[in-house]
Image (cartoon, helix red, strand yellow):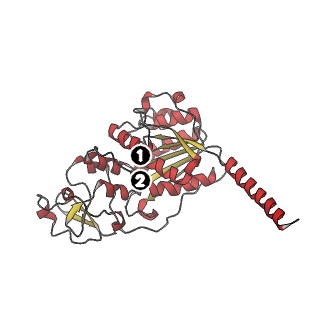
Amino acid sequence: MSQNNLFYQKYKVNNLNKRMSINTVKTYKAIDLFAGIGGIRRGFKNIFKDNIDFVFSSEIDKNAQKTYYLNYGEIPFGDITKIKEEEIPPHDIIMAGFPCQAFSVAGYRKGFEDTRGTLFFDVARIADFHKPKVIFLENVKGFVGHDKGNTFKIIKKTLEEMGYKIYAKVLNSKDFGVPQNRERIYIIALRDIDKEFHFPEPTNKTLHIKSCLEENVEDYFYYQGKPLYEKIKNHITNTNTVYQWRRQYVRENKNNVCPTLTANMGTGGHNVPIIKDKKGIRKLTPRECINFQGFDKKFKFPKDLALSHQYKQAGNSVTVKVIEEIARNIKNVL
């Protein structure tokens, strides 16, 4: 056989293999519950690329809906308690950063019934009907010990009774390339999957806080000329760290990462972390808060959205880089 024919045969085989691999890669359908500004969705999309389609989302906060629409082109359904599970499209993956509401103290033995009256019940009833392969849950670290650990036990029992194998671990954003000290509990529930899931190991590639900071920040964010300035000016001296105003004193975060961003940054006062740059002493901007959550530069807030809502949404969100690492391991077991 001539070299040309050999090349042609090899070309045909290679292209056949490419077509087969393209045709056999499954596209997973996902729903994004309690979506906020879509941080979990963003992390999964960055890893799954074109192999994931989002077929439904829910978020009750009207301002977060606006931000979600701007970035993903869809307005989430509002109150998830007001939609029947059969009205939600079929899906393979549920994502939910659900709020931690108080659970009944009546028994802790009723599994599914013990979640009624909580927003986790809506995750459970949707999962029980659609039976997705993956449920991804995120919550604050303290959720593990909430009500002496009974809340977590109820959720674990509920999911296990529906046929899921549960994996849970607390991870810190600063261990995954983001300079923010943010510990969160991640719960992964898998159904009909033979492979064992493992949480990602820390990447230990934390960037410097300056990687998240903007240049040429507006004067509005600076404290010079404002009442608080006289109280903090002699205590905020280091340009390589982040500070917090604690009502009566300044706290310096000497671990060289940003303290945990919280939703109450949007409630006024001086809850937003403070830095010193070449121009003076100021609070972080909403864009910088989003940077500390690992969002990419394409993410945007609506131009007419009040700063208070931008801060709240940034603090309420998740760290995208952590979601990406978990999503990568989920993709490997699917």
Q: Residue furthest right?
A: 1
Numbered badge on residue 71: 1
Badge 1 crowding class, 10 Å Cα cut-off, few under 14, some 14 to 19, many 20 or more, is some
Q: Earlier in the sequence, mark 2 or mark 1?
A: 1
Task: Where is residue 247? Give x, y as percent.
Answer: 18, 57
SS class, disc 2: loop
Q: From the viewer's perspective, is residue 258 above or below residue 133?
A: below
In terms of image quadrants, where is residue 11? bottom right
**Residue 195 relative to residue 276: left or right:** right
Residue underneath mark 2: 298
Can the viewer see residue 175 in this picture? yes
Q: What amino acid is found at the position of numbered circle 1 in the picture?
A: Asn
- Residue 248 shown left or right of residue 50 in the figure: left
Seen in the picture, residue 301 relative to 82 is either above or below; the reply is below
Residue drawn at x 34%, y 37% is 62
Residue 288 placement (x, y as % from top left):
32, 58
Residues packed near mark 2 inside 10 Å, few (<14), some (14 to 19) or many (20 plus): few
- Do callouts 2 and 1 mark residues in contact (Cβ within 8 Å)? yes
Q: Residue at x 47, y 34 (%)?
A: 122
Dividing the picture into quadrants, the one containing residue 232 is bottom left
Asked whether 305 or 62 is in front, the reply is: 305
